[in-house]
Image: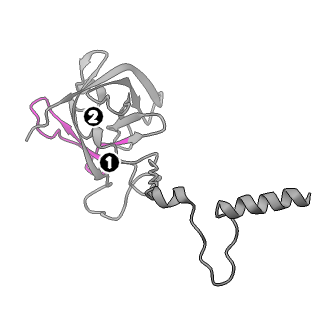
Amino acid sequence: MRRLLAVSLLVSGRLGLAQPMLGQQKATLPWQATLPLQKVRVTYLSRNALRRDLIGCYALYYERGRVDASLFDAAPSARLDSMPWRRSASRESSSFGASGGRAFRSMTGLSRAGHPAAWHRPARSPSWRADSLTDSVRLSFIDGFSGPEFVFDAPPGQTNALRGRVFVFSDHGPTVTDRGPARAIRERCPP
């Protein structure tokens, strides 16, 4: 046992693992002096973080072709913005969403001509949000009572053509109706 203790003290002393005595500096191992020190930077993506690769304009399609008036308040195209979504311009401090308004982003419905679509409830404008856990994006035209919501698969790097489904929400009758498959094709945003 004494021999094992002596060998371990000798080895740890040679490797610089022994504790320095009072007044001595701790020795560095030879390989520690030659390696550059690198700080490891870890980035965590919030579940509802902004997905910059989704920002832009998309033409919306569903089972009958290009989105039209049969989907209540949905616009044929949508411009996804990076700004946090607000309930109304008059209430700057009130944000909607479980994460303090950061989950929902501003979205503008566009006509086929590229003009902002008329929205009959300005207090509840269209919004969008991305979910990093499911790699999906939701475009909501719900006015607080009814309206469609598009749910698309949006894997990072594959955001030019999105596939998913459209659901129509209603405050009467069946509350949620699956309207079938939907697509969003990236298009050039109007000036």
Residue 161, position in %: x, y? 28, 24
| Left or right of residue 7, residue 189 in this image | left
Closer to the observer: label 2 or label 1?
1
**Hey, what amino acid is under mark 2?**
Asp
| Left or right of residue 187, residue 153 in this image | right
Q: Which residue is mark 1?
A: 105
Mark 2 closeness class: few <14, some 14–19, many ≥20 residues within 10 Å: many
* Residue placed furthest toward the bottom: 23
**Hey, what amino acid is under mark 1?**
Arg
Residue 3, position in %: x, y? 87, 58
Q: Are marks 2 and 1 in contact (CB under 8 Å)?
A: no
| Image quadrant occupied by the N terminus | bottom right
| Left or right of residue 33, residue 114 in this image | left
Residue closer to the observer: 143 or 140: 140
Helix, strand, or loop for circle 2? loop
Residue closer to the observer: 23 or 51: 23
The residue located at (33%, 22%) in the rendering is 182
Does 109 lie within the magenta span?
yes
The residue located at (57%, 61%) in the rendering is 29
| Left or right of residue 49, residue 59 in this image | left
* Label disc, if present, on residue 73 of the rendered structure: 2
How far is disc 2 from disc 1 in space, using C-alphas? 18 Å
